[in-house]
Image (spheres, helix red, strand yellow):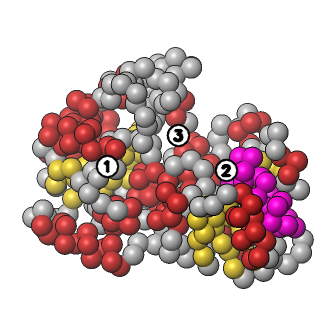
């Protein structure tokens, strides 16, 4: 393989968690000797990547295809790895004249890549973590194996803002627990199991004698506030930037989250993290939080095989979740050396 000087990682699709899980690819490119690694991402994901220790720059995909291709061509990249392939992101590296273009096989646009990788899950693999699946793209580019844990650097300004917020809430040195009860879904009128999650918030508060803070985006505000009211917790949904959310999670004694981007963020920051996987199709082996102190609540509810987070009509699996299962997992995790 030709020596890498400048490499591009295109990680623009999906949610914040999908982008965060792609960060080990940048680490692998650096380990392969790339002098500069640049990420191209969607504007909504800028805060997920800015400050990442393995990235020289973060570019935003904020123009039409031809304009973006001209910008990329001017940068003279040696290689591009596309972690979330679409026709647009298969076309951009080709139009930019990037010599090595690595992306997903078995798609109509896959011929635009000159190194094509078949995703393990399409071959029946249900055991590999998604970060290892993404690192297959880096391996196809000749990169060595690296630590698959995602990376995020918390900004000092975000830490300072968070300290001010925590002090204003009257939270002392004992600390707090973060409960993240949403998955960033468009529910479309489907019921979310607020009562169960409120009961979980109450049990976390009672068992650990700590303030429970409920996190979420502006779109999660209504659910988060209901969960907080029902569980004697406090909602910060919609009140933090992504960087401040990271600082909040970093400073928590414990994070309990449904499968989501904040779950992955808390785990990679080293916070003891419990990931709740309720649907049978949530596949915790593939999407488990990666970090030094993590555990998962495995799905046990007998969901129909066709129920996925996008089409489940009632989320009965979450509604029937026993908060005591989660409390027991928290206790076990916090006593782990």
Instruction: Give the image quarter of residue 106.
Output: top right
Q: Earlier in the sequence, mark 3 or mark 1?
A: 1
Viewer-nearest of discs 3 and 1: 1
Q: Position of residue 327 (x, y in %)?
A: 28, 42
Q: Say which residue label 3 marks.
A: 284
Q: Position of residue 80 (x, y in %)?
A: 76, 64
Residue 310 visible in the snapshot: yes
Q: Position of residue 136 (x, y in %)?
A: 75, 55
Viewer-nearest of discs 2 and 3: 2
Q: Say which residue label 2 marks.
A: 84
The range drawn in magenta is 79-103
Query: Does the magenta run of residues contain 93?
Result: yes
Q: Residues within 10 Å of mark 3 (few under 14, many from 20)?
A: many
Is disc 3 placed on a helix, strand or loop?
A: helix
**Quick check: marks 3 and 1 in contact, CB under 8 Å?**
no
- Identify the residue at horizontal 38%, vertical 21% (top origin): 314
Please identify the residue farthest to the left as the structure is shown.
170
Residue 142 visible in the snapshot: no
Is disc 1 placed on a helix, strand or loop?
A: helix
Q: Is residue 92 left or right of residue 207?
A: right
- Identify the residue at horizontal 30%, vertical 56% (top origin): 254
Q: Is residue 129 left or right of residue 106?
A: left
Q: Earlier in the sequence, mark 2 or mark 3?
A: 2
- Identify the residue at horizontal 51%, vertical 52% (top origin): 17
Q: Is residue 337 above or below residue 260?
A: below
Which mark, residue 146?
none
Q: Is residue 144 left or right of residue 198?
A: right
Q: Say which residue label 1 marks.
A: 218
Q: How many marks?
A: 3
């Amino acid at each position: 393989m030709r020596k890498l000087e400048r490499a591009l990682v295109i990680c623009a699709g999906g949610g914040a968690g999908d982008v965060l899980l792609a960060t080990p690819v940048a680490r692998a490119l650096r380990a392969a000797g790339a002098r500069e690694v640049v990420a191209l991402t969607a504007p909504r994901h800028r805060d997920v990547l800015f400050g990442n220790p393995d990235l020289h720059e973060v570019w935003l995909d904020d123009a039409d295809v031809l304009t973006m291709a001209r910008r990329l061509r001017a940068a003279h990249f040696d290689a591009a790895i596309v972690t979330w392939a679409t026709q647009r992101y298969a076309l951009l590296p080709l139009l930019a004249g990037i010599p090595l273009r690595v992306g997903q096989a078995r798609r109509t646009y896959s011929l635009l890549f000159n190194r094509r990788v078949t995703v393990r899950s399409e071959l029946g693999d249900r055991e590999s973590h998604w970060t290892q699946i993404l690192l297959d793209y880096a391996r196809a580019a000749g990169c060595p194996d690296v630590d698959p844990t995602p990376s995020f650097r918390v900004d000092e300004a975000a830490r300072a803002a968070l300290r001010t917020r925590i002090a204003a809430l009257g939270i002392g040195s004992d600390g707090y627990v973060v409960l993240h009860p949403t998955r960033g879904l468009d529910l479309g009128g489907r019921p979310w199991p607020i009562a169960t999650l409120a009961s979980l918030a109450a049990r976390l508060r009672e068992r650990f004698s700590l303030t429970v803070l409920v996190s979420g985006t502006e779109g999660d505000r209504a659910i988060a506030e209901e969960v907080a009211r029902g569980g004697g917790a406090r909602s910060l949904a919609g009140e933090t930037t992504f960087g401040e959310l990271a600082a909040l999670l970093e400073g928590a004694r414990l994070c309990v989250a449904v499968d989501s981007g904040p779950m992955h963020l808390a785990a990679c920051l080293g916070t003891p993290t419990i990931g709740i996987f309720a649907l049978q199709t949530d596949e915790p082996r593939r999407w488990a939080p990666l970090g030094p102190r993590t555990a998962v609540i495995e799905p046990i509810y007998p969901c129909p095989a066709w129920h996925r987070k996008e089409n489940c009509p009632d989320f009965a699996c979450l509604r029937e979740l026993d908060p005591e299962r989660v409390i027991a997992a928290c206790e076990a995790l916090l006593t782990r050396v």
